[in-house]
Image (spheres, coloured by chain):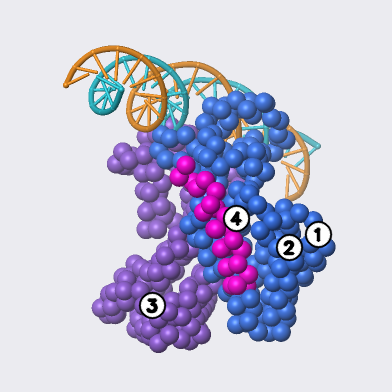
Chain colours: A blue, B purple, C orange, D cyan
Amino acid sequence: MSRRVIPLSIIDAIVADLRLRIYEGVLAQGTALTEAEVAGNYDVARPTAKAAIERLVADALLERGAHKTARVKMLGAEAVRDIYVARSIVESEVVRRLAATATVPPAAVLANTEIVARIPQPATALIAPDMEFHTALVDAMGNTRTSAMYRSLLGEVRLCMTRVQSMELLDNKRIADEHAAILDRIRAGDPDGAARALDTHLAHARELLAADLQHSPGPGF
Amino acid sequence: MSRRVIPLSIIDAIVADLRLRIYEGVLAQGTALTEAEVAGNYDVARPTAKAAIERLVADALLERGAHKTARVKMLGAEAVRDIYVARSIVESEVVRRLAATATVPPAAVLANTEIVARIPQPATALIAPDMEFHTALVDAMGNTRTSAMYRSLLGEVRLCMTRVQSMELLDNKRIADEHAAILDRIRAGDPDGAARALDTHLAHARELLAADLQHSPGPGF
DNA sequence: CAAGTGCACTTGTTAGACAATACTAGGGTC
DNA sequence: GACCCTAGTATTGTCTAACAAGTGCACTTG
């Protein structure tokens, strides 16, 4: 099962490919990734594979303790809540500030029209534009470190998306409407309203995901 | 100049020691750190030194491009503004939420009494308790990811502290007072007031630092 | 003096090896 | 038959040695 990668920086390419395979769910949560195994799959030396694994651990997509083999991170209900609260803290303040100047990010508007267009499609088709919407909001602040922080959070969000079994628990139309409400409050120059709209939007998604993960075989077993 | 380190994990120990020396200013901003040099100083192999350097690059304390030697990060006025805005985004929402439940973090109170006690001392004595104060606020949210994000920001703050020449531009008493005001607004259950107090506090520090860095020989040279 | 060339330095990556630690299975004992 | 202890195996941590490739500087040359 030898996989080829473009020679950018070998380790970068491996990181990118592994990340993709984790996002796709090819590498399910809890999957063990030994250094030798990774090295073999990509035909590279073990130190190279090691470096790639360590980068993904730093990105919170893998986890491992000293002398233990790395595993694809397991996300339980508590972890999901933690992630979404963190998102909420960053994003609600962001939309608050955007609303203060009534700055509606064009990229966010665009992303939501894309979401509206995909309402009839399966929920998985919404993942990308949904993330694009939220990223656009944060990036509109023009603050590199805030964007970087948020991006690392989204990596974990993306990870737990693959774990959600019944994607249909997410109501496409409702998502589009909630996004529209957030944009509306920003446009109206209503910081409190924007923050409130965003908070309920994230809280809604959070509890649906958390409930779903509670039922399915948790990270414990 | 061979430095000894406790045998925890060799690379962890090196990372910790380098970080300390950067914070202390022993390794001034812009200092080049070649892999061979680090390896020699700690009597370890080059791959080990390489790993340590890469960890510090990930922590944003060092920076380096492909095939170029790592240097202690230079922080200019724009970088400081970016950092402080990011801090402000996280912290103001945090205090907002703390105020919503009138939850005054005991650790923050303690840290500020320490600051009050050190008002007569030189400003450098305030760095530690000041960071402790802000960290306590964020940690009071009980959100691991938010705390982690904030900690990475503080690493850079700490870094730029060593670069500020005339520390006396920071008025100790004013810092203590502004902290007290934040705690007061939280205690009063006044989210907007707390957020506003925190925002002005950080904006004040930010502009003083930025102005100072503008004058001193910038990151360019 | 300007521009091109070449060398020294540094990083990227590999190979192979050994020590130390964690997991697993087997055997012995109660 | 159940449990503990031990040995073996797999895996990671670190090292040495080496070569290729890229960067920057100094030097030469026009």
Q: Look at the image and give the residue range highlighted in magenta.
A: A198-221
Q: Are marks 3 and 4 on the same chain?
A: no
- Residue A67, above or below B98: above
Residue at 42% across, 40% down: A65
- Residue A214, above or below D1: below
The quarter of the image holding the C terminus of chain B is bottom right
| Residue contact between numbered discs 1 and 2, judged by CB atoms under 8 Å | yes
Disc 1/disc 3 C-alpha distance (Å): 45 Å
Q: Are marks 1 and 3 on the same chain?
A: no
Q: Position of residue A132 (x, y in %)?
A: 71, 60
Would you say A45 lies left or right of B4 here?
right
Give the residue pinned by disc 1: A120
Q: Amino acid at mark 3?
A: Thr
Disc 2/disc 4 C-alpha distance (Å): 18 Å
Give the residue pinned by disc 2: A172
Give the residue pinned by disc 3: B103
Closest to the observer, A183 or B9: A183
Q: Chain of mark 3?
A: B
- Give the quadrant of residue A180: bottom right
Q: Are marks 1 and 2 on the same chain?
A: yes
